[in-house]
Image: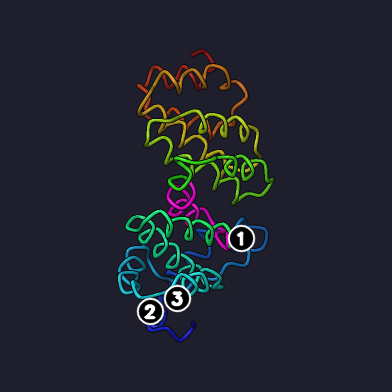
Amino acid sequence: MKSHPLLAELRTHADPAIAAHSHRFFRAEPGGYGEGDRFLGIRVPVVRQVARGGRDLSLANIASILRSEWHEERLLALVLMVERFKKTDAAKRHALHDAYIAYLPHVNNWDLVDISAPWLVGTHLLRSDRSLIYELAHSGELWPQRTAMMATFAFIRAGEFEDTLAVADILLQHEHDLIHKAVGWMLREVGNRDNRAEEAFLKEHHPSMPRTMLRYAIEKFPEPRRRAYLEGRP
């Protein structure tokens, strides 16, 4: 698979300066949340452009790319999977979802999760059993837990907020700010559609919410209301 023209084309866009920046930005240093990740140095729009040439790839070949040591190659695989998911039938969507879950350990940074989880998990589960969301939320592992939270974006888009609020409750006291940001972001998305639903959650939980989570959740509030929450007097 490494010799496929799509990967060769992708690597023609590699830039060492961008790679160095990405290494810092995605915290790939020892002890960072992305420790050990490797970067070619390719911007997301370029990855998406290259992905347009991957319509002939089998799912097995895409899955092999998802196992790559290179961040941008894994991103390429996920773009291919999501775009295929959007345009295909239920049986093929199920196969894409199953492959995604099988290789979930390779979806190991926030950008990879955010681009894929709402589609390959959330949209797939819209009309089926959602217990997987809760398994991921209770996994104790950073990226599966962010996957659980971000997958609920599909439910929010469908006007369904119960699972988002339930997963937010599970992750409320998580120690990592990448979970704080994801939870706050999804609460804000609930509020964009139903402010009363978000505020009911916030009124119960804001005293114990991590500050970053709260700030993300109330970012779009009118300034007096936002300040009231930050000062603990909503």
Say left or right for 191 vs 138: left
Q: Is residue 116 magenta?
A: yes
Q: Quadrant of residue 107?
A: bottom right
Residue drawn 47% across and 75% down? Answer: 61
Give the amino acid at mark 2.
Leu
Residue 206 vs residue 147, the one in the foreground: 147
Disc 3 and disc 2: Cα gap in Å? Answer: 20 Å
Precedes in sequence: disc 3 or disc 2: 2
Stretch of the chain drawn in magenta: 103-121
Work out which residue is located at the far bottom of the displayed protein and give it. 3
The label number, if any, that marks residue 16 in the structure image: 3
Q: Which residue is mark 1?
A: 105
Location of residue 96 with respect to 142 vertically, above or below: below
Q: Are marks 1 and 3 in contact (CB under 8 Å)?
A: no
Nearer mark to the viewer, of 1 and 3: 1
Mark 1 surroundings within 10 Å by alpha-carbon count, few (fewer than 14), some (14 through 19), many (20 or more): some
On the image, the x and y values in percent for residue 26 come to 52, 59
Location of residue 197 with respect to 213 vertically, above or below: above
Q: Which residue is mark 2?
A: 6
